Amino acid sequence: LCRLIREIGEEALCEVCTMHPRFFIMSGGVELAGFGLACEKAVELLLAVDSLRLRAEGESQSFDFGALLAFLGKAVPREWLLPPARLTLAQFSFLLAQMKDTEPIDDVWPQQLTALRLDCHKLLPRYAKLLAAQGAEAAEKLISYILYRQLDKAERYGMEALCRYARFNVVFIYLLAAETQDLPEAVRRWSEQIEYDEENTARLIRACGRAPSSIL
């Protein structure tokens, strides 16, 4: 997809572009690596696999996300990694209010939020239908991966707040996909607005940590 690579060659890339969309974080003395979901190919690969599998450098055998959390001493109940099967109007309103409070990446973002708000009563059943069609495991995989990206913040915010943040964002992604009929693009669009903006990420983690249990 990169015009520089296509027309000049990979050697023309700067260090930032060479590493994109890879990320590296430290958690529990372990370096974790992955791909940011603003990259279309990263989204395609994540959505295509049945479950989230990880591999230690130099090892051929993979392991699941739960095994990593247990190894890091950060194991959480499985229900923390599952989105609500249905949304209430209060949950929907909280979700959009928090997203509206983030710094927009472009002029289109506020327009997308307005479109979601106007289609509220249509989107609530569409969300439930899409979630059921995709399956709980697919949503859990996405929640787990979004949480994985933020594990370096566990000491600062706590695992419950990070899990709430991950669930919150997957609910939003599914709502956006219910509106656009394009789940991969909903993931990518969310990522460039939230995942790649540290201030937006921190703002949402704090909001999710403070939210009542009935909301998240």
Image (spheres, rainbow, N blue to C red):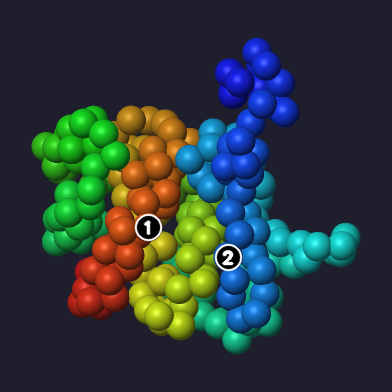
* Percent position of residue 83, x then y: 39, 62
Classed neighbour count for the residue bearing mark 2: other residues with Cα under 10 Å, few (<14), some (14–19), many (≥20): some
Relative to residue 45, is residue 155 drawn left or right? left
* Percent position of residue 103, x then y: 23, 48
Q: Earlier in the sequence, mark 2 or mark 1?
A: 2
Q: Dividing the image into 4 quarters, which one contains the C terminus?
A: bottom left
Q: CA distance from mark 2 to mark 1?
A: 13 Å
* Percent position of residue 204, x then y: 29, 63
Question: For residue 90, which quarter of the picture?
Answer: bottom left
* Percent position of residue 135, x then y: 50, 51
Numbered circle sitting on residue 25: 2
Q: Is residue 130 above or below residue 8?
A: below
Seen at 45% across and 73% down, the residue is 153
Q: Which residue is mark 1?
A: 198
Classed neighbour count for the residue bearing mark 1: other residues with Cα under 10 Å, few (<14), some (14–19), many (≥20): few
Q: Is residue 74 above or below residue 180?
A: below
Closer to us: 160 or 28: 28
Numbered circle sitting on residue 148: none
Dot 2 lies on which element? strand
Residue 46, can we see it?
no
Closer to us: 111 or 137: 111
Seen at 58% across and 65% down, the residue is 25
Dot 1 lies on which element? helix
Seen at 30% across and 56% down, the residue is 200
Residue 156, can we see it?
yes
Relative to residue 89, is residue 43 drawn left or right? right
